[in-house]
Amino acid sequence: MIVISGTVAINPALREKAVEVVLAMSKASEAEDGCITYRFYADLEDTNLFRLFEVWEREDALAAHFETAHMATFRKELPELVAGPMDMKRYDVEKMSDL
């Protein structure tokens, strides 16, 4: 299992547009084979800081995700919406259990 987690600062003047873009990305990504979850969240202390949390079943599913039309659209739209560098981390998880 692969977990991607990170943050992206959004330009406050373009927050509404950013919400539209990330919601479309989430919906399309979650429909992909091998995607367990793909969600953006607004930080509670800074509503212009979006957090991304993705979970993928397999490496090939994640690789295919990067080749989708919605990823190409997302990559095209994102630069105008961000207000700083993105901070993304990948975690390769061998085991998961409920707490």
Image (tube, rainbow, N blue to C red):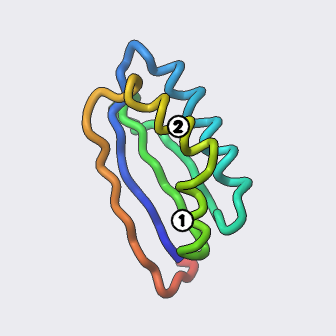
* Left or right of 12, for residue 53: right
Considering only vertical position in the picture, is 2 above or below 43?
A: below
Q: Position of residue 12 (x, y in %)?
A: 37, 18
Mark 1 or 2, nearer chain start: 1
Residue 62 position in % (x across, y down):
55, 65
Q: Which residue is drawn at 67% across and 68% down?
A: 34
Q: Is residue 26 left or right of residue 81?
A: right
Q: Is residue 85 left or right of residue 72?
A: left
Q: Residue furthest left?
A: 84
Assess disc 2: are there few (<14), some (14-19) or many (≥20) residues with their C-alpha within 10 Å of its C-alpha: some
* Left or right: 83 in relation to 93: left
- Give the crowd class for mark 1: few <14, some 14-19, many >=20 residues within 10 Å: few
Residue 74: assigned label = 2
Q: Which mark is residue 77?
A: none
Q: Nearer the viewer, residue 99 or 28?
A: 28
Q: Which residue is drawn at 62% across and 50% down?
A: 68
> Where is residue 94 shown, x and y percent of the image?
48, 86
- Residue at image point 38% right, 66% down: 90
Where is residue 73 drawn, in percent x and y?
A: 56, 35
Answer with the quarter of the image where residue 21 lies.
top right
Label 1 – label 2 distance at C-alpha: 16 Å
The residue where tag 1 is placed is: 63
Q: What residue type is labelled 2?
A: Phe
- Viewer-nearest residue: 83 or 97: 83
Compared to residue 41, the image places residue 98 above or below, namely below
At label 1, the amino acid type is: Ala
Image point (33%, 33%), residue name: 9
Q: Is mark 1 on a helix, strand or loop?
A: helix
